[in-house]
Image (cartoon, rainbow, N blue to C red):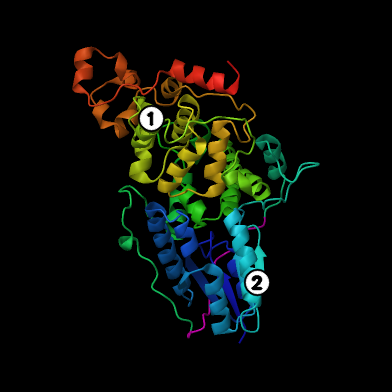
Amino acid sequence: MSVAIVLFTSDLRVRDNPVLRAALDAADDVVPLFVRDRGIEAAGFGAPNRAAFLADCLTDLDAGLRERGGRLVVRSGDTPREVARVVSETGAREVHMAAGVSAYAVHREERLRAATAGAGAGAELRVHEGSVTAVPPGAVLPAGSDHFAVFTPYFRRWSRERLRAPLGAPRRVRVPASTASEEVPARKAVEGVAPGVPAGGESEGRERFLTWKRRDLDAYEDRHDDLPGDATSRLSPFLHFGAVSVGELVHRAREHGGAGADAFVRQLCWRDFHHQVLAARPAASSADYRDRRDRWRGEREAADEISAWKEGRTGYPVVDAAMRQLLHEGWMHNRGRLLAASFLAKTLYVDWRIGARHFLDHLVDGDVANNQLNWQWVAGTGTDTRPNRVLNPLAQARRYDPRGEYVRRWVPELAEVEGSAVHTPWRLPSDVRGRLDYPDPVVALEEGLARFRQARGTG
């Protein structure tokens, strides 16, 4: 009996999974393998919120495989070493996995290729594109460059690409009975999880998409920036772990049609855009994509302001609401992310890497490509064609939370302040301010803007 291994990484699903399908087509028996990579945890990417969501995804993946006669095999340790052990134990001739774009994923692939080739009789590593993104990084290129540095021309080319048709779930998965496994991780075993982290897994993700499509997709173009309306899909954690397929989401949205679906597809394209940038420029995970010669303020120079930002105590209610949503849910509204990031990087002029690290410590959907490159976009060191734009939190609050509902939801100290006055509590009468356990602004917006313009040489 021939054996192949499916190494699950960022594709924790049984539906529309080309890696799983390729392995099933290649062998009689398949080992669906997930390695709890100690290297990822040691590097600080095993944050509790993501660990809890991951446990849900693995539990659901195991259930989906068992429905089809299989099961998930879990090992812990160094991924190449553990995969090589399974190759030796089973005599597998092929190992299938999804392509990654981070420097860690690329290095892991190189080590896997060497480890599997040297394990027992040797196995061939087969790396598949089109599982983590809708369009593989590098599939569309501008003339004279290895990637698109500006989103709009990328989107035009990306939109013309023919996507593969979504794959159904396999009918049957045969796993060698003798292949040993650890217990599938359980959410209850993870400590330090934020109280509002949602349930994860393919079943949950598919149900969430169907419900959202029926209720909110048609209005997405008009409502995706509506802070209190909370009308976004909230699918980003499921996309991060591959519990839902981005390619299938594009297909389903296009089948649905309409302006809302078009706007949703555009947002999915942004995800692919960042993956193709990071694939071409892996150093952008920590180094400026475009060097602006910024002399960022760091932990020592801006310690108090950074702490206030992390805790949601900056004195600007819409920024604080976004930061507190992050701490409670392990997620933040997309408009809130832009506001919070702009405030740290440009109003406080703090190194964007400090903010990106804090987000990765809490976001369930925190992956290197989207988190780091979105931060760089906001900080003006990335792909934004207007690198010196600064988002004014008061103007943004008036536009996207005009009645202050989002602020009152997440900043209970201001619950008694009615209407738009909640966005400027420092302007309230002194007797009202005295009753509020809420700080004054850490910096005047004019002061922050002047400092940023002077530092960038645009003042």
Q: Quadrant of the C terminus?
A: top right
Q: Residue at x 49, y 56 (%)?
A: 241
Most foreground residue, 407 or 145: 145
For the magenta stretch, what is the residue range? 164-178
Reply yes or no: does residue 43 show up in magenta. Answer: no
Q: Residues within 10 Å of mark 2 (few under 14, many from 20)?
A: some
Q: Could one spot residue 132 in this view of the protein?
A: no
Name the amino acid, label 1.
Glu
Reply yes or no: does residue 171 show up in magenta. Answer: yes
Please give left or right for residue 120 compared with residue 51 in the image: right
Vertical position of residue 447 compared to residue 284: above or below: above
Q: What secondary structure prevails in the magenta region?
A: loop
Locate residue 74, reporting x and y percent.
Answer: 45, 72
Please give left or right for residue 355 compared with residue 285 in the image: left
Q: Which residue is mark 1?
A: 305
Please give left or right for residue 319 compared with residue 277 in the image: left
Name the amino acid, label 2.
Ala
**Which badge, 2 or 1, is on the more N-terminal residue?**
2
Q: Quadrant of the N terminus?
A: bottom right
Assign a secondary structure to mark 2.
helix
* Mark sitting on residue 114: 2
Most foreground residue, 4 or 49: 49
Q: Residue at x 52, y 22 (%)?
A: 452
Vertical position of residue 102 compared to residue 370: above or below: below
Q: Could one spot residue 301 in this view of the protein?
A: yes
Q: Residue at x 47, y 53 (%)?
A: 238
Q: State the separation of the CA atoms marked 2 and 1.
A: 47 Å
Locate residue 68, reporting x and y percent.
Answer: 49, 74
Most foreground residue, 222 or 97: 97
